[in-house]
Image: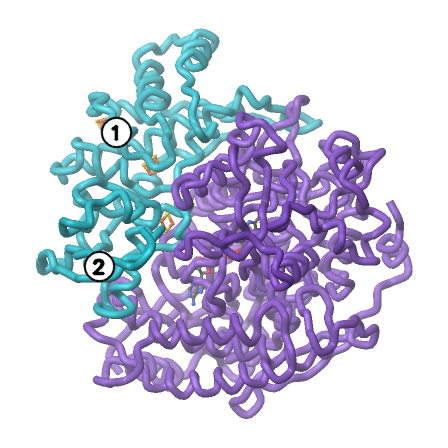
Chain colours: A purple, B cyan
């Protein structure tokens, strides 16, 4: 094979979202020579789109808030399937990580007393989301990006990793290509942090960008790592539904946190009919109490509109299915009749702009039409809570690509805090690991040659499959057969369809040359998209119960036995293999925290 | 609107070796934006058409191009505002070197960004920082910047003057400097640098940058002019300055 560019580092971080940037900052601070690699330009990762805020028990709005309550909410939201060690670390360290951003220049919205203001979000007992209007992710990514640049961390932008390299059982680096030139590049490094985000592009209706093709999940799987909780894909209850071209674009939960309510096509506040047992004691059961809650937190219980996302998404699907949807097949999200225009445009400028520009809807005057949209992947690499180490030596994972923290369902705002807490820990874990390595691993040349040869195959075929059409087909199948509501025979059909698509993806073609060629890039991304989609479908089939984001029509109940295990995916003889692993039992002191009624 | 109709998209195709406009007839459905149509062309006619994008919601600033000669985010440009009877031209941003098709080499901006002396916080009081909403509102306006580089693209100081680039930070970076200078916790002073190396003096307040900003940031009025005042008025009085800034505050969608 022709020569390729080669770089050596102590730690490489794949991904430049919140998790990747925070990991790189920490690794570099620990003295490791660190590089960041990302598919897009710096500052454009998914984190930039995050709107509502970052969850941390700062207690600036409600002094009653503390890490225990945050831990409790997170575990309950995750239907107790969370890795409790991660959930505990997360709740304990989030405040410190958020305040540190302020030391680096972040400007969160303020309270009257000049402290960080916190906003209400679903599933959080107290107003807990530090935020900047509805552009919190932008603030976070800019601050982290500028910090990383100021620390002189090497950044390889528009570079896609297609394979992790190994030396025996250890990680030895990563191999990929520069999007701009199409040329290959090898990174030699004993420690690799995966921070590649999620897999939303497996679905047709999604709030996620082109980057979300599950690369990190697939890279980890192929390198021999365990994935857990892959059945738990979060569908956010409120995405845009009209016009079709914007379907799926997110409408932040902040709309509901700031007073917006859900109504069906017949103008009923249907959420009162969908309060689950687990949350009954803390949820208002009539409109008067729900409305009072916004001003009287002690005397009233929270509105059902702010139940965790899985509950609200399911309720919306049910309403639409029963024929009580809106003209464009959604439900109404109404803030116009509840708050004055000045308040709405100040608190939710991005939403105002988004609806005005893209849908000709003035949200200060009319209700929005919304419906569920694929949003977040709870599942990912199985990691150690303290160090973020995956199950392969030298591999670490943080952010959306890591599993365990959120269990069966993530609470809003808990991702941005997760990125900071575990990004930092992964950076430290990787730097410590790299420092302890005495003989640097070396990947054999035939690994890179094989990957390079495979990557170029699409150019050799003249009349093969169109990558764009294959991706569309995959999205249609996943949406229809492995979507919000699942049932065994559909899941099986889904797996068959994925099998067929895998075959066809083996015949995919690329036109033109290697210079900035999106068709070719997609042809390569398809492989990880397929591998990750298959992992989702296999795990969904294996979990024969409904829990959190997994809703099985054929198994509508929660099965206590399945509450004690994670579904695990790993490669065995070149094929994905489904396994189970027991959850570590929750210690008694933490159990009483979770069961505490507030 | 309603049924799909067909339009002609006249797209610049080429690379560093040159190129030209190529016509693609393509279907458009109601509600679509220019980026949707570019995607349809990729999927059905030109799989290697190079386009940058990420969020498709006006939040990441990746998809900038010149549509019918006007610099815009293609994901926020509704097809319905363009005349379907005429071919719709889509060209890459002109100020930056071409890579391929609609993708340009924007590394100049990243280089200039590296040269901004970082945030330098004042010592932290034992009970943590306190800042008030009114003290940070102006800086928050600047922080809305999504780095689409459309303002850099239209600024005449560099648009046809490659030679000015090494010593001109450009409007995007000016708001970055303004943001640091006006940050309640920052203790740095970047005024000499701005004047001597970053070309603040080259800006003659034409306001073209403010006009194209998709985030409606008042780049010239709220960042560049106050910076110029600070640079000139070395003995400036922060109270006087703050008074001016508040008077000049606009009412707009995103404040
Ligand atoms: C619209 C929207 C709003 C949201 N709002 C909130 C919110 O208010 N609060 C909250 O807590 N969460 C929110 N979330 C979720 C949250 O934003 C994401 O979960 C989080 O940003 C993921 O961060 P990350 O660092 O894991 O990955 P990302 O920020 O997605 O970064 C992934 C990085 O990996 C790179 N990458 C991927 N594959 C490869 C590869 N093969 N080679 C090289 N690089 C690669 C990408 O280029 C990118 O740089 C929101 C999500 C969306 C979509
Ligand atoms: S106002 Fe100044 S910075 Fe803005 S476009 Fe004009 S010359 Fe350039
Ligand atoms: S200031 Fe406005 S136009 Fe300039 S880069 Fe930022 S968002 Fe774009
Ligand atoms: S794609 Fe993000 S701004 Fe257009």
Most foreground residue, A566 or A19: A566
Label 2, ligand 4: CB separation under 8 Å: no
In the displayed structure, does residue A456 sit left or right of residue A63? left
Query: Disc 1 is attached to a residue of which chain?
Result: B
Q: Residue at x 20, y 56 (%)?
A: B7
Mark 1: give few (<14), some (14-19) or many (20+) Cα within 10 Å: few
Kindly indicate the quadrant of the structure image that contains residue A422: bottom right
Kindly indicate the quadrant of the structure image that contains residue B191: top left
Q: Residue at x 21, y 59 (%)?
A: B6
Which quarter of the frame holds ligand 3?
top left
Disc 1/disc 2 C-alpha distance (Å): 50 Å
Mark 2: give few (<14), some (14-19) or many (20+) Cα within 10 Å: some
Residue A314 is tagged as none
Q: Is residue B63 above or below residue A232?
A: above
In the displayed structure, does residue B99 sit left or right of residue A471? left
> Would residue A145 be visible to someone looking at this image?
yes
The residue identified by callout 1 is: B197
Question: Of the residues tagged 1 and 2, which is closer to the observer?
Answer: 2
Residue B6 is tagged as 2
How far across and how far down the image is residue A236, in percent?
59, 56
The residue positioned farthest toward the bottom in the image shown: A573
What kind of element bears circle 1? loop
How far across and how far down the image is residue A313, in percent?
64, 58
How far across and how far down the image is residue A254, in percent?
60, 42
Disc 1 or 2, which lies upstream in sequence? Answer: 2
In the displayed structure, does residue B36 sit left or right of residue A558? left
> Would residue A10 be visible to someone looking at this image?
no
């Amino acid at each position: 094979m022709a020569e390729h560019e080669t770089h050596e580092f102590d730690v490489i971080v794949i991904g430049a979202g919140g998790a990747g940037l925070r990991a790189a900052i920490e690794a570099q601070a620990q003295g490791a020579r660190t590089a960041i690699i990302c598919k897009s330009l710096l500052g454009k990762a998914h984190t930039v789109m995050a709107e509502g805020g970052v969850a941390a028990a700062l207690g600036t709005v409600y002094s009653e808030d503390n890490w225990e309550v945050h831990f409790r909410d997170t575990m309950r939201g995750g239907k107790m399937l969370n890795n409790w060690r991660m959930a505990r670390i997360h709740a304990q360290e989030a405040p410190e990580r958020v305040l540190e951003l302020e030391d680096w220049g972040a400007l969160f919205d303020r309270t009257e007393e000049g402290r960080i203001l916190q906003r209400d979000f679903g599933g959080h007992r107290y107003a807990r989301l530090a935020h900047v209007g509805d552009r919190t992710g932008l603030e976070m990514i800019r601050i982290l990006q500028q910090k990383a640049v100021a620390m002189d961390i090497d950044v390889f932008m528009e570079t896609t990793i297609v394979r992790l390299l190994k030396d025996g059982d250890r990680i030895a680096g990563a191999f990929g290509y520069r999007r701009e030139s199409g040329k290959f590049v090898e990174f030699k490094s004993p420690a690799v942090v995966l921070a590649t985000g999620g897999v939303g592009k497996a679905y047709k209706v999604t709030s996620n960008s082109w980057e979300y093709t599950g690369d990190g999940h697939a890279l980890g799987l192929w390198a021999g790592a365990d994935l857990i909780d892959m059945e738990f894909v979060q569908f956010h209850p409120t995405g845009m539904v009209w016009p079709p071209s914007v379907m799926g674009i997110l409408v932040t939960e902040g709309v509901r946190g700031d007073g917006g309510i859900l109504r069906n096509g017949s103008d009923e506040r249907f959420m009162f009919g969908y309060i689950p047992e687990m949350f009954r004691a803390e949820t208002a059961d009539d409109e008067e109490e729900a409305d009072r809650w916004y001003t009287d937190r002690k005397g009233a219980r929270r509105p059902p509109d702010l139940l965790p996302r899985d509950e609200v998404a399911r309720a919306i699907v049910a309403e639409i299915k029963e024929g009580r949807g809106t003209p464009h097949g959604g439900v109404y999200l109404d803030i116009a009749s509840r708050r004055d225009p000045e308040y709405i445009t100040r608190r939710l400028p991005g939403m105002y702009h988004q609806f005005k520009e893209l849908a000709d809807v003035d949200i200060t005057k009319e209700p929005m039409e919304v419906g569920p949209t694929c949003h977040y992947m709870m599942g990912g690499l199985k990691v150690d809570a303290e160090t973020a180490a995956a199950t392969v030596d030298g591999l670490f994972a943080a952010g959306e690509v890591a599993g365990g923290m959120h269990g069966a369902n993530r609470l809003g705002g808990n991702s941005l805090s997760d990125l900071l807490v575990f990004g930092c820990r992964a950076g430290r874990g990787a730097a410590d690991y790299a420092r302890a390595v005495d003989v640097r691993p070396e990947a054999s040349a035939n690994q890179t040659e094989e990957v390079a040869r495979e990557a170029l195959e699409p150019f050799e075929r003249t009349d093969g499959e169109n990558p764009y059409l294959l991706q569309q087909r995959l999205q249609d199948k996943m949406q229809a057969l492995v979507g919000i509501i699942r049932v065994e025979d559909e899941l099986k059909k889904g797996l068959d369809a994925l099998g067929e698509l895998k075959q066809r993806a083996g015949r995919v073609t690329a036109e033109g040359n290697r210079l900035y060629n999106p068709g070719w890039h997609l042809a390569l991304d398809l492989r990880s998209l397929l591998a990750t989609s298959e992992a989702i479908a296999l795990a969904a089939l294996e979990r024969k119960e409904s829990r959190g984001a997994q809703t099985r029509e054929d198994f509508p109940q929660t099965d206590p036995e399945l509450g004690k295990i994670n579904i695990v995916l790993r490669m065995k003889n070149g094929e994905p293999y489904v396994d189970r692993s027991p959850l570590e039992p929750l210690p008694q002191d933490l159990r009483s925290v979770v069961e505490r009624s507030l | 609107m309603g049924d799909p109709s067909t339009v002609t998209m006249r797209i610049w195709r080429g690379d560093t070796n040159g190129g030209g406009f190529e016509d693609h007839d393509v279907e458009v459905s109601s509600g679509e934006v220019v980026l949707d149509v570019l995607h349809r062309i990729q999927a059905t006619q030109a799989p290697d058409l190079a386009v940058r994008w990420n969020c498709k919601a006006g939040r990441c600033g990746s998809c900038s191009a010149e549509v019918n000669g006007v610099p815009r985010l293609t994901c926020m440009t509704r097809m319905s505002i363009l005349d379907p009877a005429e071919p719709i031209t889509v060209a890459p941003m002109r100020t930056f070197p071409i890579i391929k098709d609609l993708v340009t080499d924007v590394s100049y901006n990243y280089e200039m960004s590296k040269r901004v002396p970082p945030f330098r916080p004042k010592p932290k009081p034992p009970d943590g920082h306190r800042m008030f909403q009114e003290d940070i509102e102006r800086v928050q306006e600047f922080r809305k910047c999504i780095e689409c580089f459309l303002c850099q693209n239209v600024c005449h100081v560099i648009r046809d003057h490659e030679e000015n680039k090494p010593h001109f930070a450009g409007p995007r970076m000016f708001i970055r400097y303004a943001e640091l200078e006006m940050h309640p916790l920052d203790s740095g002073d970047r005024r000499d640098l701005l004047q001597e190396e970053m070309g603040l003096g080259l800006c003659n307040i034409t306001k073209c940058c403010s006009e194209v900003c998709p985030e409606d940031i008042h780049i010239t009025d709220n960042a560049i002019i106050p910076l110029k005042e600070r640079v000139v008025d070395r003995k400036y009085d922060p109270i006087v300055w703050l008074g001016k800034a508040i008077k000049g505050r606009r009412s707009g969608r995103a404040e």
